């Protein structure tokens, strides 16, 4: 959510930042509506003052026995009361319209975010690891012999439709092991607090974390009004809604492993093979709530937490900073981590680490009390995948595939797999 006062103070800068995201200037329309709202409030306040003045004169006229003046003033008070109510209602309607407009405008990019139209204009900032040289034609994850029977799309389609999968046996265990490994690493090494969140949330939580009204069609809603979360960023971030936090308690660092649900409304025809893009998936999420002065450093710290997972699993990756045209609606700056997938001969996104500044905090009124005792200020919120479990499974399977159809698994997973380090071509752990 944008601060209308900041737009008033520098409308040209607001429009220039919007234009970097490919959006048309909006300051003149917003400020015209804001001026109308403020004028209506002033008009209502003036009428209310007149009403109070006339109310005092009613008593004086009654005391004097001036019945005609008494009746005139009483009628005037009644009319002013009605006028005030009408003006206040009009001001509320204008305010609601202005708030709705502001809620649909994306966050403004940070100064260091590169300009660009789409993912082709993202900028690589680092790489780690070297993609292995295979002496055979590499396969995509669902084609590997030891994986194929355990990654059951047909049965999932029978029960749920397209873009679902049933994982079986050893592959299901590897998937579970990955999630456990990520959570343990984030808690034990990265200092995050584990939280098991609900996967159903109310409108307020969706709105406060910028998922409504913009992305209603990308989410699933139950018949009684709850929303299925697309990421545990939503309940984790919303824990600070309406709070005034003590500055000494910041940063608050959280992690959660949860089911996630996305309608993929805008991705028809994309990644239809395999389990790269599903309606239901699992993700380990990281969320930080910080002091504004610390948010840029916190984003870099979170990025290293996510990168560290891939390094521990020995998965080559690259990190890119998203350009203005590819950033998400609520992001001020986003780094994507892309894991190397030999089956596709390409890097594919496995994590996004974003800072929203105070964009979400304004929507959910999350503030902190400065150490010097000054006026409460809005916190900054950050979120990042640490990592998408299904996509990480894909990366592990494809990078570890062997010519005979088996998969060599990362040593880091052995403690979670009973010491086993191989998925055999028959689909067993060994």
Image: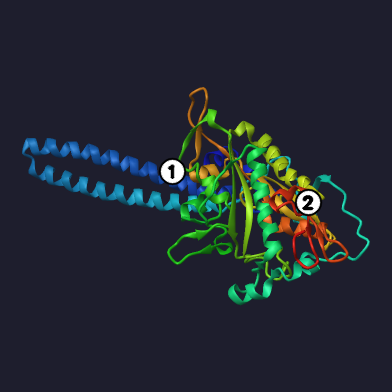
The quadrant the C terminus occupies is bottom right
Q: Residues within 10 Å of mark 2 (few under 14, many from 20)?
A: some
Closer to us: 169 or 300:
169
Q: Among all residues in the image, which is located at the extreme left?
A: 65
Horizontal arrangement in the rendering, residue 80 relative to residue 277 (left or right):
left
Q: How is the image coloured?
A: rainbow
Horizontal arrangement in the rendering, residue 284 relative to residue 249 (left or right):
right
Q: Residues within 10 Å of mark 1 (few under 14, many from 20)?
A: some
Q: Nearer the viewer, mark 1 or mark 2?
A: 2
Closer to us: 145 or 56:
145
**Residue found 78% across the figure and 45% down from its top:** 311
Is any part of residue 401 visible from this angle?
A: yes
Q: Among all residues in the image, which is located at the extreme top?
A: 372
Task: Using the image, tell me which numbered label, if any, was put on residue 177.
Answer: none
The residue tagged 2 is 410
Q: Earlier in the sequence, mark 1 or mark 2?
A: 1
Horizontal arrangement in the rendering, residue 412 relative to residue 200 (left or right):
right
Q: Among all residues in the image, which is located at the extreme bottom?
A: 158
The residue tagged 1 is 38
Location of residue 206 in the rendering, given as x and y in whole percent from the top left corner? 51, 54
SS at badge 2: loop
Location of residue 377 in the rendering, given as x and y in whole percent from the top left corner? 52, 33
């Amino acid at each position: 959510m944008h601060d209308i006062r900041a737009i008033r103070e520098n409308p040209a800068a607001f429009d220039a930042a919007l234009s970097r995201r490919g959006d048309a200037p909006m300051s003149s329309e917003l400020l015209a509506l804001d001026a109308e709202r403020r004028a209506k409030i002033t008009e209502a306040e003036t009428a209310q003052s007149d009403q109070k003045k006339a109310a005092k004169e009613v008593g004086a006229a009654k005391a004097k026995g001036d019945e005609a003046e008494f009746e005139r003033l009483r009628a005037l008070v009644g009319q002013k009361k009605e006028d005030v109510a009408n003006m206040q209602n009009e001001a509320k309607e204008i305010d609601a319209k202005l708030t709705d407009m502001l809620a649909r405008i994306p966050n403004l990019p940070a100064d260091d975010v590169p300009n660009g139209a789409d993912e082709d204009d993202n900028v690589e900032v680092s790489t780690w690891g070297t993609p292995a040289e295979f002496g055979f034609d590499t396969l995509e994850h669902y084609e590997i012999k030891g994986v194929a029977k355990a990654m059951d799309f047909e049965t999932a389609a029978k029960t749920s439709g397209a873009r679902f999968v049933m994982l079986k046996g050893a592959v299901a265990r590897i998937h579970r092991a990955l999630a456990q490994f990520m959570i343990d690493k984030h808690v034990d090494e990265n200092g995050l607090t584990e939280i098991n969140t609900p996967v159903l949330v109310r409108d307020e939580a969706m709105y406060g974390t910028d998922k409504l009204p913009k992305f209603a069609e990308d989410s699933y809603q139950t018949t009684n009004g709850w929303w299925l979360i697309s990421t545990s960023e939503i309940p984790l971030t919303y824990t600070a809604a309406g709070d005034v936090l003590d500055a000494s308690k910041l940063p608050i660092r959280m992690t959660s492993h949860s089911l996630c649900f996305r309608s993929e409304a805008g991705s028809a025809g994309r990644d239809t093979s395999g389990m790269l893009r599903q309606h239901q998936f699992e993700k380990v999420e990281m969320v930080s709530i910080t002091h504004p002065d610390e948010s840029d450093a916190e984003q870099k710290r979170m990025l290293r937490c996510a990168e560290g997972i891939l390094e521990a699993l020995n998965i080559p990756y690259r990190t890119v900073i998203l350009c203005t045209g590819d950033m998400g609606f609520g992001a001020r700056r986003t780094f994507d981590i892309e894991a190397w997938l030999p089956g596709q001969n390409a890097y594919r996104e496995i994590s996004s680490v974003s800072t929203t500044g105070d964009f979400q905090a304004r929507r959910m009124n999350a503030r902190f009390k400065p150490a010097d005792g000054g006026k409460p200020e809005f916190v900054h919120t950050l979120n990042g995948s640490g990592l998408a479990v299904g996509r990480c499974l894909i990366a592990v399977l494809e990078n570890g595939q062997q010519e005979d159809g088996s998969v060599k698994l990362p040593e880091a997973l052995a403690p979670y797999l009973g010491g086993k380090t191989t998925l055999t071509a028959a689909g067993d752990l060994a």
